Structure formats: structure tokens, C-alpha cells
Image (cartoon, grey):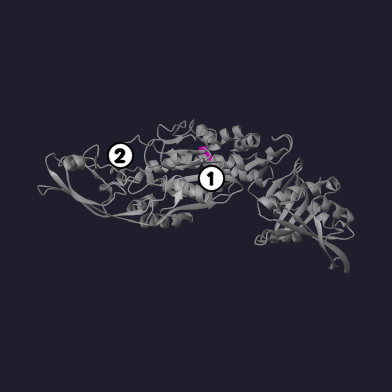
Amino acid sequence: MKISKSLVKIRPGLLGSEFDLALSELNKYFNLKIIEKKSGERLGTWIIPKAWRLIRADIRRSDGLIILKCNENDIQKVWQHSIAFEGNINHSELCKHITVGYTNNVRNFDVAYYSNTWGFSLTPEEASNLIDGFDYYVKIETVFYDDNLKAGISTLQGLSGGILIDVPISFRELANNLTNTDAALSLYNFLSSRKRYFKYSFMFTPETIGVPLLLNKCPNLLMNADCGISIMGMAFGNSLHYKLSKRGDTELDEIFKLIELRNPIKTAPYDLVVGSTCNEKAYNSSGYPGILGRVSGQPPGSYDSYDTSLDNLNNCDFNALKNNSEVLINAFWVLENSNRFKNSLIGEPFWSGLNLGQIFSNSKNRFIYDSIVGMVDSKINFKNFLVSMLSHKNLVDDALMTLADKNILHDKVGNEFLTKRYLVKELRAKDINSRYLSWLNNDEVIRYLETPRVNSISELNDFVNACSNKDDCILFGVFDRISLQHVGNVKLEPISLADGNAVMGIMIGDNAHRGIGAVPEILEALHLFALNRLHLSKIRLGVLKKNKAAIRAYQKCGYVISEQATVFRNKTNTYEEEYKMEANLKVIKINV
């Protein structure tokens, strides 16, 4: 509500100082990156117009009656982008340049883009004074000037793909359309408060012409997206209206159809003839993949105040805005959770396999845990379950995080990944036990490692917590996916995000998992995690020259020797030869 109230006062046009002020207001909330292009430049079949400003306008009847008098603040009385005109004309000629509101005290909003004409928007009372037989003195003083067409993009990073949130900034005083910014802020705040599976791009554009600007400046952003929505006026109606994308089968399309069964929402098929609006038309006519649905409080054109002076803040129902925004958030809650989690377990997913039900035996919401574990890998069933639990989102969120914390679920947006046989996730103090301690005192395990002996669980706890508190370190635990037993560790330290590299060490402590190809299997997945999640391009390691088996294993994993050095080993108090090895993550292929 706070954004739309500010924007109505600013009254942004397609471009010019008012739209700049609108972007500045939006930037308070969305951290925008601004893209722009100059007046007169071509965007597809469009030519970017000049910015426009009204100075004054008058209509005076030949008997002296003033029909209309307006200044620069009365832009709703003059067609947007009217050219300047001054002269005496007859009644018939004047009427060609007049539109009249449908009821008393109402004037239409009209535009004259690219038409090289001028005009006035009159109320019926004003129009009643236009009488045949009189001449009329007309003066419209306007200024056109070069400026930049601009749009703002705010990105919330995620792991996968791209979701587009289109927020057209309707020109001038269409107050209800401008409430789309408040709905967008509610969604933005919800998504920014969570770990996200998807990457989200919120796009604030001048309506219609902003789309070719995006296609020109950010073609990959649009062409590589998975799906998206265009948010229109949200502060009215008894239910949210969602129109399916042109394609009709995006993941958001499917989620909104499921939500319709349980929430105040109505979906409609894609139809260009009925209710197609501003940016939606521009996207679908530009070669852009037809994956953009549309949400609004009512179908566009279905309410009398649309495109008239009645479309003001007094006509906005802010309770409806709140309710519609909540339904919108619900859809994205389902979208995120249905993609974010999967089972960590191999085999029987229910409680009988590891007697996991005992963990939650005292929970009054045990059915939530049962349902999640049983459905999380069946996407459509899990979506149906999530939709059925929309009124209990907090309980489901707690259950999902608890199951992930217990290693029962794999959280794709945590520092973790799956292999065929292993769950690899960030090691925490809760994972420390006497088995782990025994590895660090086993000569066979640590023979070639610089890892010192550790004498107590307390020392081990301090080490794990220290790793967790470092910004340039991730200590992973390797867990068997059948037993969930801790079998080894992988560490990246130091990690240099600026240079795109990290140093890696790996230890398989459980003897049953040594010599069975665990290292190549884990490193293959680690490389993908480092490349796609951390955006690293290179991983380095050190290995003693005499450790022939390890060198061969690393070479199979794509590592090459970069240098040889003599190093001092604190553990043995001797100097030994060591190879430095490195892997280029963008080109390697592991030969398991």
C-alpha cells in the first residue's frame, strides 16, 4: 500500500523525470539495477518516444464560457502525449479531439502516442457545454524532450533456472494497477526471507514498451526463464484471478490450478481476445516463450472504473490487496518447497526402514512428517499435499527443516548434495560421535593426512564449530544413504570466491567404504556443487608423492599435477615430497 500511494502522487509516464522518481521510490525496497536506452532509438518495431510534459491547456467557447482550464498538474484532462495546438475551430472539428466519461464527474484516460494529434478527456458535464453553432478557442501547450527509456530489475539469487516477476508501471493515475507494486513487495519480502531454490527477477518496466527494452538489454534473462507471472491491479475483487500462460503448462500454471480447489482464486485459459493486458501482449507478440501467466484482483476491463479518473486510491480495497497477495505468496511457497527437498534415503522411505517414527512419536503433528516423507519425491502428490496444508505453512516449514536436520531429507539449497550412495552435507556438532573420533586415531586412516590425532569429543567439537564459523571453509560430512551413518569428510578450505578456487581435502574414515570407489563418486558431485553453487572454476589439493593410489584416484577425477614441492610434516617431523594437483571444473570428466 505504501508504494502505490507514493507512485500515484508521482504519476509516472512512460519515460521522463516522473518515471525516474518512480524508480527511485521502488529502489528503496527492491535494490534495482537500471537499464536504459535513448529516445529515438529503435526497439524492434518500436521507436522510443520523447518524454512529454503538459504546461497548460484551455478550451473557451466563442461566447466567453470556459469549458476547461488546466495546468501541468491536470494531466488526466489532456490525452497523454498530445502535441501542442492553438487555434479557433468549429464544433464538429473539436469533437474529433474529445472523449467523454461514461457518467458524471468521470473522465477517461486516453493517449496519443505516435499519432501526432491532440485531445481532451472531458466529464459529461463539461461536454454538455460543447454546443454546435459556436466556435471554440483551443490551446494545448506541451513540451517533448529527449530522455532515456528505463526499467529496473531486482534479482534474488537461487540455485536453479529463473522465475520472472513482471511488474508493469502503469502510466499516470491508474491507482489500482499501481497496487501491483505492493503485491510484488509482499512476494519479494517473503522470498528474500528464505533460502531459495529458484532465481527470481522482479522487472519494473513502463507498461508495454518496457518489454522490448528488456529483450534488447537482457535477452538471456527472458529467453532462459522457466516460468513467470505478470502482476496487475490487486486491490479489488473477492478472489485472485490467474490467467494461464500462453503455453498453458508451466509449473506455476499447474500450481495455481491446484490452489484454485482450496483458495479464493479463479483461473482462466490463455485468450488474447478476452482480457489481455499491456506487458502480457508485448511479451507474447515478441517471440518470447509464452510462459508468463497473469494475476489480478479482477479480469482487466471487467470493472467500470478501469482507465478512468475513478481508478484512484479511494477505489482501492486494501483488504482485498492483502488477501490477494497472500494467495500469491501461497503459490510461491508451494513452488519453492515442491522443488527444494527430496528424500535422502535409499529404499523404504517410511518409518519402518530405520524406525524413524520414534523421533517424532511425541509430535501432535506426526501426520505431517509421515506425509512429507511419503510424498516428497512424487512431485504432483507433494504439491497436492502442500496445497492442502496452506493454512499450516509454519508447521510444514518446521517439519521440512527438522527432517532435513535429521538427514532424512536432502535440502537442495543447503551446503549439501547427493550421490548414488551418499548424502554429503555440512558437518555439525550434532554429527560428532566416538566413531568419528576413532578415525582420527587410526594410523591407516590418517597415514597420509596432516590431520593431527584428537583425544576427545570436546576437541573434535571445537574443530567442527571452528570450521562452521569460518567464511572461507565448508566442512562436509559424508553419510551413507541407506544407514545414514557418517563414513567420512570432505573439506574445502580456503575458498576464494573472488579468485574462483578452493583447496580440497577428503577422508574416508569408515573402512567398509574404502576401496569401493567412494572418492571418485563423491568428487564428481562435489565438482558440480563447487561449479554451480559456489561458482568456482578450479579446485586444488596436495598429496604426498609416495601415496601412489591416491594420485591415480585423483587423476581419474580430472586432477593434473601442477608442481612438486618439498614440505615439512609436523606429524612425522620430516621433510617429504608432495605433488600439488588441480582440476579445472569447467572441462574435467571423471572416469569412475
Quarter of the rendering occupied by the C terminus: top right
What residue do we see at 30% from left, 39% from top? 305
**429 displayed left or right of 36:** right
Q: Quadrant of residue 395?
A: top right
Residue 179 visible from this viewpoint: yes
Which disc number belongs to residue 222?
A: 1
In the image, 290 versus 401, the foreground residue is 290
The amino acid pointed to by label 2 is Ser
**9 displayed left or right of 126:** right
Q: Residue 391 magenta-drawn?
A: yes
Which disc number belongs to residue 399?
A: none
Q: At numbered mark 2, what does the secondary structure look like: helix, strand or loop?
A: loop
Q: Which residue is the site of mark 2?
A: 305
Q: Quadrant of residue 322?
A: top left
Q: At numbered mark 1, what does the secondary structure look like: helix, strand or loop?
A: helix
Q: In which quarter of the image is residue 18?
A: bottom left
Q: Where is residue 121 in the image (x, y as percent from the top left)?
A: 25, 44
Q: Position of residue 208 (x, y in %)?
A: 42, 44
Q: Where is residue 180 in the image (x, y as percent from the top left)?
A: 41, 45
What residue do we see at 87% from left, 65% from top? 577
The amino acid pointed to by label 1 is Leu
The span shown in magenta is 390-394
In the image, 76 versus 502, the foreground residue is 76
Looking at the image, the residue that sits furthest to the left is 63
Residue 138 visible from this viewpoint: no
Number of residues whose C-alpha sits closer than 10 Å to that of mark 1, classed few (under 14), some (14–19) or many (20 or more): many
Is 36 rendered above or below residue 380? Answer: below
Spatial distance from mark 1 to mark 2, Cα to Cα? 33 Å
Is 574 rendered above or below residue 392? Answer: below
Q: Residue 6 magenta-drawn?
A: no
What residue do we see at 65% from left, 34% from top? 374
Is 396 rendered above or below residue 445? Answer: above
